[in-house]
Amino acid sequence: MWRPPERIRWKSDAGRWPTADQAAASRLFAALDAGPMRLAARTWVPAMVPWRATEDGAVTPEVLAWYERFARGRPAALVVEATGIRDVPSGPLLRIGHDRFIPGLAELVKRVRAASGGETRLLIQLIDFLAIRRRPPPETFFRRYLAITDRHRKALGVATDDEARERLLALDDNALETVLDARELESLRTGYRERVTDTHLPHVRDLPKVLPELFGRAARRAETAGFDGVELHFAHAYTMASFLSALNDRSDGFGGSRAERARLPLQAYDVVRSMISNRFAVGCRFLAEDCIEGGSTVDDAAYYAERFAAAGMDFLSLSRGGKFEDAKQPAIGEAAYPYTGPSGYECMPQFISDTRGPFGRNLEPAARIRAAVRAAGFATPIVVSGGIHGFAQAEAVLTDGQADIVGFARQALADPDWFRKVRLGRGSEIRVCEYTNYCEALDQKHAQVTCKLWDRQSLDEPGLLKSKDGKRRLVAPAWEP
């Protein structure tokens, strides 16, 4: 993962923990309505992909145990991982692109309800993504994948495709740059990746015709399964975020200006609304900033937030960065990972940081976006996350008007009982996240995600679910006061 050049080492500081009475009187543990969804507090666990589904995207005992463990800590809202809306293979990532996934997801809802005593509201994040391939060995790329054209043959001074492939294999990097175009070089160096601007590809050109219905059907399945709502994934490196990005220059009415870039996400939301009941919450997660050259800014995000609020979304959850454009070059045989470059660092900053530090880097942009929404006359709750681990820190987010709901991702992973412990006046017993990004390194490998603060503890616990190699526990240790 990329790190700032200053390489300043920061240490988590949770500050003073409140008494039970102080917690009860706080804004953090005050109720809030997000559309039809009543939250018992302003606490939120954002979507995190734990890589525990089957290769076919179905719920497993490991998936159930993962979300049940978070629910026992009783956050006000828990968002299930990015879940694919298409019925296509996507590895051990949950899917909701067919009715056959409903029973497993319904069991997940049931387990969360029971574990939280009905307190935790459960949402599921709906995602679409385009094709990405692993970085190929040069020989494989030139012999199998590269489409030889007259441009290549002319530049190489050869007559046949086979001659061109052999010549290309013999060239060094500098020479290749004079023969291959930018996208060909990218496919060689980092692997092939589709973009929403690849309108020469029929399935990419037709995304505006296809995606709204896919999101709508997925949301209807989520309501059938018993979820309280859905979070539309409009963030990071994926399809809908790419439509919102300032880099989207499609010329078909779905790219170019801000209004055109927002058109498809808004259409998807409208179709979702038309296919679910008025008891079902719908919001989205999008970027406060792309954090890449030429990408969307806070001003763009404020515009989108106003449009989303005006459309009737029940909540707006803010993230930042996490783009392919500045990702680190993957090793041969691996795929690019959008959290390895500077924008990825902005999404998941580490304890090795710059003078700003890794804590609350998204708060100032969130405050500007919230202010724009309020100035436009909307009270839509704003969710913000990113390096928040202490009670006073979270409470200040709310009292200062930076957001309305506080998201705890890595901190909730480190200690799912953070919420119960704080409410009971037992904050001193919390395992505080160290922001080493141990979890992020596992995610990058698509390995089962755990936390280094607990994954080697009590491995002899009866009935414990363990990682495939048997060396790590898959859920945090149990806690009771």
Image (tube, helix red, strand yellow):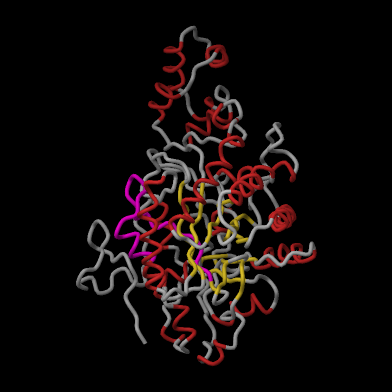
Instruction: Count up the numbered dots.
Output: 0
x and y percentages locating residue 82 in the rendered image:
47, 53
x and y percentages locating residue 190 in the rendered image:
48, 38
Q: Nearer the viewer, residue 219 or 325?
A: 219
Q: Which residues are magenta?
A: 44-67
5 shown above or below 153: below
Residue at horizontal 63 percent and vertical 42 percent from the top: 243
Q: Is residue 294 visible?
A: no
209 shown above or below 104: above
Snapshot quadrant of residue 278: bottom right
Q: Is residue 235 visible?
A: yes
Q: In the displayed structure, does residue 50 sit left or right of residue 279? A: left
- Would you say residue 368 sits in the magenta stretch? no
- What quarter of the picture does the C terminus occupy? bottom left
- Would you say residue 49 sits in the magenta stretch? yes
Which is the main secondary structure of the residues drawn in magenta?
A: loop
Residue at horizontal 53 percent and vertical 15 percent from the top: 149
Residue ranking furthest to the top: 159
x and y percentages locating residue 432 in the rendered image:
45, 77
Q: In the displayed structure, does residue 161 sit left or right of residue 179? A: left
Residue at horizontal 56 percent and vertical 56 percent from the top: 277
Q: Nearer the viewer, residue 167 or 260?
A: 260
x and y percentages locating residue 31 in the rendered image:
59, 78
